[in-house]
Amino acid sequence: MTSPVPLAAVVLAGGASRRMGRDKATMPYDGSTMVELVVSALSARCSPVFVIAAPGQPLPELQAEVLRDEVRGVGPLLATGRGLRAAADAGRELAFVCAVDMPHMDTELIGELAEHAARLGVDVVLPWDGRDHYLAGVYRTELADRVDALIASGERSMRALVDTVDTQRIVMPTQRALTNVNTTADLS
């Protein structure tokens, strides 16, 4: 049996949560908070785990390194770049990038995507179940410089990154791990 592909994790927790109407990271969910559930799931497969939070955003104590966005309101691309740079500085070539609103994330999905990333040698591996899941994919940490260049040119979307690098989409069935909790209706 081969050993698992070394993989850092980046949790994007600093979003505006406009559809939810309150901070999703600290939203109670299944006896915990969403950020605690996601960090716990990622910690079972990834090391180190970085949580990218907004300036001043309150978070519970986590088994992860919390990094703060320098500016608010520029979308997930800037936070992804920050996390990828931290993962690269920690010696990882690959990082699983995940949104904080995915409390059902599991190690099976992470492991499968990591194996594809290692085998294919591409820049990004995304699950695809009829739509792209930009914030549930494996990214090469060396993409941090590419992210910086995109931000400098005015880009803010994850699509701007994945459409300009070597990206592989892995067809998967619809699964609970890829479920986002975006509204109060999604909580039930």
Image: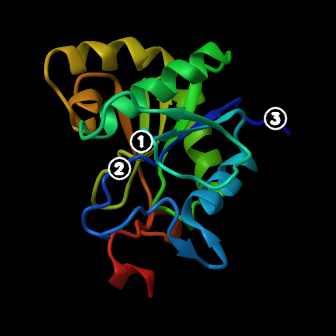
Which amino acid type corresponds to the residue marked 3 in the rendered image?
Thr
Q: Which residue is mark 2?
A: 15
Which amino acid type corresponds to the residue marked 2 in the rendered image?
Gly
SS category of the residue bearing label 2: loop
Percent of width and height locating residue 185: 34, 84
**Marks 3/2: CA distance?**
37 Å
Q: Which residue is mark 1?
A: 54
Instruction: Using the rendered image of the protein, determine whether residue 107 is visible from the camera's viewpoint.
Output: no
Q: Looking at this view, is 126 or 141 the one in front?
A: 141
29 displayed left or right of 154? right
Q: Give the class, few, some or many, for how many residues have Cα within 10 Å of label 1's Cα (few <14, many ≥20).
A: many
Q: Give the class, few, some or many, for how many residues have Cα within 10 Å of label 2's Cα (few <14, many ≥20).
A: many
Q: How is the image coloured?
A: rainbow
> In the figure, residue 75 lies in which quadrant?
top left
**Marks 2/1: CA distance?**
7 Å
Which amino acid type corresponds to the residue marked 1 in the rendered image?
Ala
